[in-house]
Amino acid sequence: MKRTKIGLVIASALAAVGLATAALAVPNQQGGQPPEKVEKGKPFKGKVEAMDTTAKTLTVGGTLIYVTDTTKLTKNDKTIKFTEIKVGDEVHGTTRLTFDGKTEAIRVKVGPKEKEKDQEPKY
């Protein structure tokens, strides 16, 4: 009788540990996928070939770039509006690929890219 009780206690303890482990192994609420890494962004530079103010897009180097409300737009280190960018302007910045395959601007700077301070001129 005493052995049966000890056996039941041990079996119950093992079952409780097994259930607790199974509960911890349940996938998270986001579909069980690990959080995605944040991209640093892909650099771009070139002249604005085309603009669509309605769709808020720029074409630079043959790439259609979407500008959002969170895109940081600057010229001479001052914030500007999307409508201040013109076809033919030299621009550079960073983009990222959205979940639906669109190229979205993170940052767009109007004007030539500044040369590195340590960079020597090429002859």
Image (cartoon, rainbow, N blue to C red):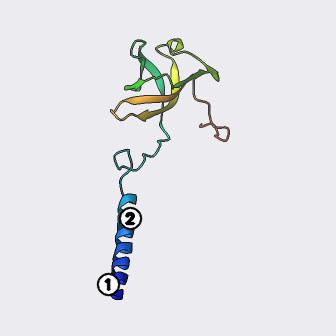
Vertical comparison of 101 with 55: above or below: below
Among the 4 quarters of the image, the one containing residue 9: bottom left
In the picture of the structure, the residue carrying the numbered disc 1 is 4
Q: Residue at x 58, y 17 (%)?
A: 80
Viewer-proximal residue among 54 and 46: 54
Q: Residue at x 62, y 30 (%)?
A: 114
Give the secondary structure at mark 1: helix
Q: CA distance from mark 1 to mark 2?
A: 26 Å
Vertical comparison of 114 with 84: above or below: below
Q: Could you tell me residue 82's position as x and y percent? A: 51, 16
C-beta proximity under 8 Å, tags 1 and 2 = no
Which residue is at the far right? 117
Give the secondary structure at mark 2: helix
Vertical comparison of 30 with 110: above or below: below
Q: Which mark is residue 97?
A: none
- Name the side, left or right, on which 36 lies relative to 83: left
The residue type indicated by label 1 comes to Thr
Marked residue nearer the N-terminal end (1 or 2): 1
For the residue carrying disc 1, how many other residues have a C-alpha within 10 Å: few (<14), some (14-19), or many (20+)?
few
In the picture of the structure, the residue carrying the numbered disc 2 is 21
Q: Residue at x 46, y 14 (%)?
A: 87
